[in-house]
Amino acid sequence: MVNSTVILITGVSKGIGLRMAEICLDRPNHIVIGSVRDDTTPALLLVHIESTSPEDPKTAAEVVQAAGIDHTVPNSDIVWAFQANAAGPLGLFQAFRHLLQKSKAPRWVSISSSAGSISRVGPMKSYIVTAYGMSKAAQNFMTHQQEWLTVLDIHAGNARTEPGNWIARQIGLEQAPLSIDESAKAVLKTVSTSDSSKIIQIILHSHVPPSRLKQLPVRMLLGSSSTQLTGSVVPW
């Protein structure tokens, strides 16, 4: 336990959160604590955290008090927009702050989105992610470095989750270009190698129908015709 890294990931029942948990479980000396909305069929060391509940993070923190926490990755999806993406992570941080402070190398990682970039509000505001972008901007606002804590905002790319595939269909693609496995691996690699106070986007560039290329949000989210994963800093 002394030499182990304990990582809490919310939203591990499916998608990127599930894949990140699986990858971390394969790493030596890693203890994974995963939260789900429905904990009736546990598969990991599970704690119940509904992102819209102010009490669930406090209860979960009490449950994992003995193990402690080194890394925290809030990863709940779009469902309740502001509640899930802003109020939820804030409550989680408030509940787990005292455990992070006991870690030798604490990290807080927000799964954000380039849709929350204020600098890109022009092309985004009339697009299909208005409420989502607003909630992610609020999340970004509260995600900042402290002297004792390494903090990251990561845009995990347009992955093949249910929301990711829905967005892809709106712009003429059959599915999102980035697999869940690729996204999860890239997020975890970025977490271990990056400094604080950046919004970092992980993008798989893919072919976009010519009729859609004039739409700025499409070019911003999916890029051109390369097939390389890239990591770049997104303006606040």
Image (spheres, rainbow, N blue to C red):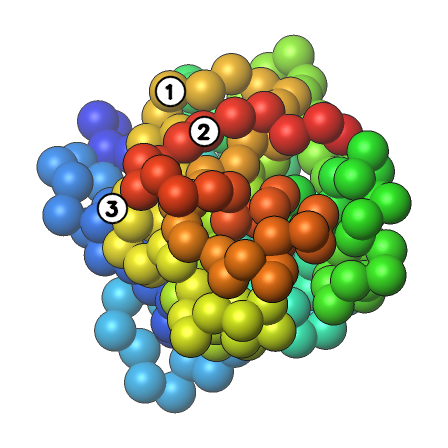
- How far apart are labels 3 and 1 at the CA level? 15 Å
Q: Nearer the viewer, residue 24 or 5?
A: 24
Marks 3/1 in contact by CB < 8 Å: the verdict is no
Three-letter residue code for mark 3: Cys
Rendering coords of residue 92 (x, y %): 64, 51
Q: Nearer the viewer, mark 2 or mark 1?
A: 2
Disc 3 marks which residue? 24
Dot 1 alpha-carbon crowd within 10 angstroms: few under 14, some 14 to 19, many 20 or more: few
The quarter of the picture where the C terminus appears is: top right
Disc 2 marks which residue? 231
Rendering coords of residue 22 (x, y %): 23, 56
Three-letter residue code for mark 1: Thr
The picture quadrant where one finds residue 234 is top right
Disc 1 marks which residue? 193
* Disc sitting over residue 174 in the figure: none
Q: Nearer the viewer, residue 53 or 140?
A: 140
Residue 86 seen anywhere in this rendered image of the structure = no
Q: Nearer the viewer, residue 119 or 216?
A: 216
Marks 2/1 in contact by CB < 8 Å: the verdict is no
